[in-house]
Image: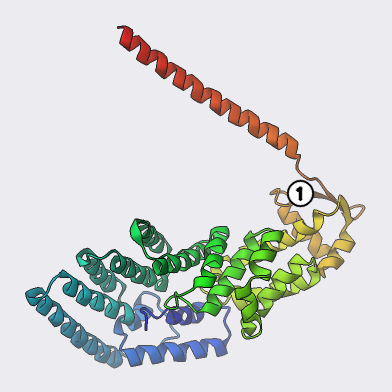
Amino acid sequence: MAVPNLALAQDIFVLRSPAMSSETKAKSLKSLMTAIEDGNKAPLYYYLHSSLDLQAVPWDEDSFKAMSNKNAEEVAAIEATIKEAEEADGEMEIAERWVKCGEYWADVGDKDKAIFALRKAYDLTPGLGSKIDILLTIIRVGFFFDEKAFVGREIENAKVLIERGGDWDRRNRMKTYDGLYCLSIRKFEESAGLLLDSLSTFTSNELCTYEEVVQYAMLAAAVSLGRVPLKTKVIDSPEVLSLLSTAPSIESLSTMTNSLYICDYASFFKALVEVDETHLKVNRYMAPHAKYYVKEMRRKGYSQLLESYRALSLKSMAEAFGVSVEFLDNDLSKFIPQKKINCVIDRVNGIIETNRPDNKNAQYQLLVKQGDLLLTRLQKYGTAVRMSGSERIA
């Protein structure tokens, strides 16, 4: 099994989240404690107690000491094999034993020792493919402890190696890693492109399940893609369609994307509420962006409807979305001042008037700006040429 076990990171998120039900928390606590006790994960146990101060996890000093002793025995055995390799074998064998040491610390939840050992293995490893695999393990450690900046740096390092000669499998796995990272930092458009591309060649089971990566791809695509690409890349996607009959978890996502495409806005709003409850608030990657995501999807629905009209009554638009006039008026008022929706509300007459941007004027302003930039560059170039000419005359 790949390390660290990222399902445990989700359990930790559940226990820390006030939005989770007591039943869900009890299930996650049981799963987490079973994994800690069966795997002798003393560093993870201590991390939950000291760094996170997770009150839901009961502390037992005797259990902690017993697990720590077993960790020490296991590491001593690994270090003995490293010493033997240093005395008798080459760098490759030494590197493999350091990888094993790093993976052990990653499995039991000691981030610093895991990264130290894996870096040591990386420095000793001659093969490009093996170096990439080590970096992917380091990235998973970062994902486990939710260190986004760290994950971002390591992904860039891995990309450099892959461009130097990564094989087909590692290139495809990298798409999933990068796509999940982009999702976690709210770069939904980049995430959608990477995750959708990875679906047909998905092999990153150490990171998430195939069903989960389909869910993440649908979430990212729904909020970032236009109506036509959403249809071709998600709604009609063979990978998505193949899961519809066997994965109830993506039903609400499918309803949300389909109803948005066919302009069934009342169903779209209902599905969006369900998606918020079953996919956003309960997922550790999406929870920090749940409010933004729901707001952006509402804006997307409003904008799509208003594109077809020059004027529309508040009442008819509210009926289309299945909400009250008061809710719609208040919600639209959040987007209009920021120019995220091109319309104005005539509250007296109960009418919404669209005011589409003047594309010709925008194009003219862009042309003038680009022209000024080009003239500036030509003037600098002319000055440089004259200076070099005068130097030759002198």
> What kind of residue is marked 1?
Asn
Residue 323 lies in quadrant:
bottom right
Q: Is residue 91 left or right of residue 250?
A: left
Residue 385 on image: x %, y %: 41, 17
**What x and y, as percent, mark residue 65?**
25, 89
Tell me: residue 157, above or below residue 112.
above
Q: Mark 1 points at which residue?
A: 342
Determine if residue 363 is in view.
yes
User: In the picture, which quadrant includes the C terminus?
Assistant: top left
Tell me which colouring the rendered structure shows.
rainbow
Q: Is residue 305 left or right of residue 96?
A: right
Looking at the image, which is closer to me, 68 or 381? 381
Residue at the spot x=76%, y=39% of the render? Answer: 358
Residue visible at 21% across and 86% down in the picture: 74
Residue at 34% x, 59% y: name it: 165
Q: Is mark 1 on a helix, strand or loop?
A: loop
Q: Where is residue 64 in the image (x, y as percent from the top left)?
A: 29, 88
- Say which of 247 and 16 sits in front: 247
